[in-house]
Amino acid sequence: MKVIICGAGQVGWQIARHLSGERNDVTVVDNNPDLVRRATDTLDVQGITGFASYPDVLDRAGARDADMIIAATYSDEVNMVTCQVAHSVFGISRKVARLRSQSYLDAIYSDLYRRDHMPIDVVISPEREVAQAALQRLAAPAAFDTERFMGGAAQLMGIRLAEDCPVLNTPLRQLSDLFSTLRVVVLAVRRDGRLFAPESGDQLFAGDECYLFVPTEDVPRTLDVFGKSQKKQERVVVIGGGNIGLAVAQALEKRSGGRIRAKVIEKNRAQAERAADALERTIVLNGDGLNAALLAEAGIARADAVLVVTDDDKTNMLAAVRAKTEGCPFAVALINDPTMVPLLEPLGVDAYINPRATTVSSILRHIRHGKVRGVYSVGDAEGEVIEAEVMSTSSIAGAALRDIDFPEGVLLGGVKKGEKLHKPSGGLRIEAGDVIVIFALAADVAAVEKLLQVSIDYF
């Protein structure tokens, strides 16, 4: 597959990293020569310096025979024009654009993206994706990472094991014996900084970060088994009233029906006034989220959770720490730089949201081979959890799980047959039409795609 990626920033670089690692023909375009050089020096990609929306620049990037273009520059308008040029001049069949402005995303203007108007096949909104991720973190305070699969029927949860976890030092195969009706699968474990897919004889230790795949109805019991308690989040303080903070506050108002009482702190007065106008029941305070007196005014000591989503990683980390020291039991921080993540646990920050990983996952969902329904990037693009429908001509259709030769870094989380979700077992047979969820380390993603792939099928 030949792909042109416009924008070599964090998101563009990660997409290029994924696709080039799977032996696709990737060309990166950016008007910043340093970003282009970084991409070509570190990845197996070609680089073109220039403005992505210029026809001659796209021509040099190989647009005449490209299969797909991904417009992920920092400008919504450049991304939109790039897709228009890719369609009108070069006839590129698949066009993905990242759009930030809420005005472009309003449902009443959705006709804008028809093929005869602004031909964009897939619109990705980082702010909406991140706001959704933030709501999922708040809904599962025991987990540092969460994502929904199979239409909400199952969840991926990342939990950190404490010293009092009841299942420490227990071989994973014994979990099935001890809790025979519990359909949880330990898909991945991070230990001493290394992510791996565990084998049935592996044990879990205090300090391990485990990624669990579990049916949504089994989540409360699973958390009990792994020594975690669920507490309802009824008082939430949001620090940062920009697009993400505002989207979260609006969603909390809609979803809770008044049950959740939220307060927003925003340093910029104009942003704070905009948020106050847009929100109905949420109190908006104008001031610095690092200010202890302002946090006290927001009732941080009585809050169940604080969500820090300003546009600065260091501010987010410090504000989360300050909120914890002022008495808030649960803190979630927005972190763009993955090298900051190892600092969160020593600082006492409970969970984080990585906008880059969230956006990358959203884009990858639309560019995979076969009937892939969802992709979630784990860690710093170290692995992926992939949801896919099994096609009748796939190599695994009709085979029992024990007869499928999965690579070492691959684990099956669950199989959905019709409306019923099954825990994987050796005798379970995979049939055409089944929906499966698979974890794969980054090096094994290509092998998983080969198992699923019947033909190149973009959707």
Image (cartoon, rainbow, N blue to C red):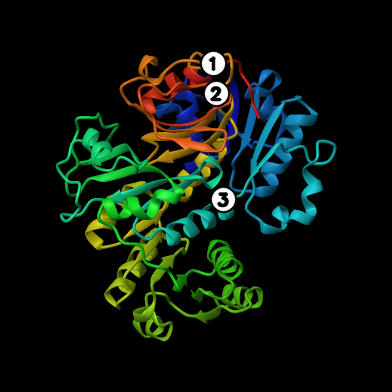
Image quarter of residue 79: top right
Rendered position, 103 above or below 441: below
In the rendered structure, find residue 390 and report the number of the disc placed on it.
Answer: 2
**Disc 1 target residue:** 394
- The three-letter amino acid code for the residue at tag 1 is Ser
- Residue 290 in percent (x, y) is at 37, 75
Query: How many discs appear?
Result: 3
* Mark 3: few/some/many CA within 10 Å (<14, 14-19, 20+): many
- Residue 373 in percent (x, y) is at 57, 34
- Mark 2 and mark 3 residues within 8 Å of each other at the beta carbon: no
Rendered position, 241 above or below 188: below
Observer-nearest residue: 297 or 288?
297
Query: Secondary structure beneath disc 2?
Result: loop
- Mark 1 and mark 3 residues within 8 Å of each other at the beta carbon: no
- Assign the C terminus to one quadrant of the image: top right
**Which one is in front in this view, the residue at disc 2 or the one at disc 3?**
2
The CA distance from mark 2 to mark 3 is 29 Å
Image quarter of residue 192: top left
Disc nearer the start of the sequence (2/3): 3
Horizontal placement of 433 versus 230: left or right? right
Rendered position, 289 above or below 29: below
- Residue 332 in percent (x, y) is at 39, 62
- Mark 1 and mark 2 residues within 8 Å of each other at the beta carbon: yes
- The three-letter amino acid code for the residue at tag 2 is Val
> Looking at the image, which residue is at 45% across and 60% down?
139
Observer-nearest residue: 40 or 192?
192
The CA distance from mark 1 to mark 2 is 7 Å
> Looking at the image, which residue is at 30% across and 31% down?
197
Observer-nearest residue: 35 or 306?
306
In the rendered structure, find residue 126 and report the number of the disc placed on it.
Answer: 3
